[in-house]
Image (cartoon, rainbow, N blue to C red):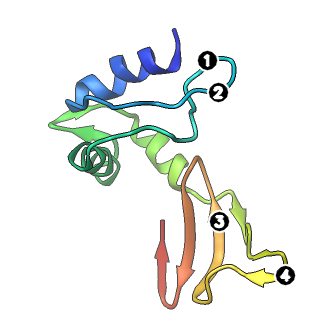
Amino acid sequence: MNLKAYAEENLFTPLGITPGEWGMDAEGHNNGCGDLHLRIRDAAKFGLLYLDDGMYLDRQIVPAAWVEASLASYTRNAFAEIDGKKVGRHFHDIGYGYQWWSATVGDYDVD
């Protein structure tokens, strides 16, 4: 099963999302790292899914353990500098997990 078909069956349909274009690589595979066009309300549903530990309308769509693991930072100080220049003057401890960026800004942790 290709990525688009899997996502439609297991994520988009349960969330009531109708995706727009989804970019592909040179071999014709949908880009798993992004390039997916969603309406803002559909993107918000995805955000709500994560805020509710993988639940949407009383249905577990994504396992809560996956949500937790995917939001963890597995890299610290990723891209703290690019070409000798600091990335974001207020960002510290820039990290990366499963396609999620995180950082510390002042007294706040942001994901």
Tell me the number on the disc at residue 25. 2
Disc 3 from disc 2: Cα separation:
26 Å
Assess whether mark 4 and mark 3 are in contact (beta carbons under 8 angstroms). Answer: no
Disc 4 from disc 2: Cα separation:
31 Å
What residue do we see at 52% from left, 31% from top? 23
Instruction: Please tell me whether mark 4 sits on a helix, a strand or a loop.
Output: loop
Query: Would you place residue 83 above or below residue 50 in this image?
Result: below
Name the residue furthest top: 1
Disc 3 from disc 4: Cα separation:
18 Å
> Neighbour class for label 3 at 10 Å: few (<14), some, many (≥20)?
many
> Neighbour class for label 2 at 10 Å: few (<14), some, many (≥20)?
few
The residue singled out by tag 3 in the image is: 95
* Residue depth check, mark 3 versus mark 2: number of the one nearer the observer: 2
**x%, y% of residue 81?**
78, 77
The residue singled out by tag 4 in the image is: 84
Kind of residue indicated by mark 1:
Gly
Horizontal arrangement in the rendering, residue 8 relative to residue 107 (left or right):
left
99 or 28: which is nearer to us?
28
Of the two numbered discs 4 and 1 on the same chain, state the one appearing first in sequence. Answer: 1
The residue singled out by tag 1 in the image is: 28
Instruction: Please tell me whether mark 1 sits on a helix, a strand or a loop.
Output: loop
Disc 4 from disc 1: Cα separation:
37 Å
Assess whether mark 1 and mark 4 are in contact (beta carbons under 8 angstroms). Answer: no
Kind of residue indicated by mark 2:
Asp
Instruction: Please tell me whether mark 3 sits on a helix, a strand or a loop.
Output: strand
Assess whether mark 2 and mark 1 are in contact (beta carbons under 8 angstroms). Answer: yes
Name the residue furthest right: 84
Kind of residue indicated by mark 4:
Gly
Disc 1 from disc 3: Cα separation:
30 Å
Assess whether mark 2 and mark 3 are in contact (beta carbons under 8 angstroms). Answer: no
Horizontal arrangement in the rendering, residue 38 relative to residue 107 (left or right):
left
Would you identify the image quadrant in which residue 87 lies?
Answer: bottom right
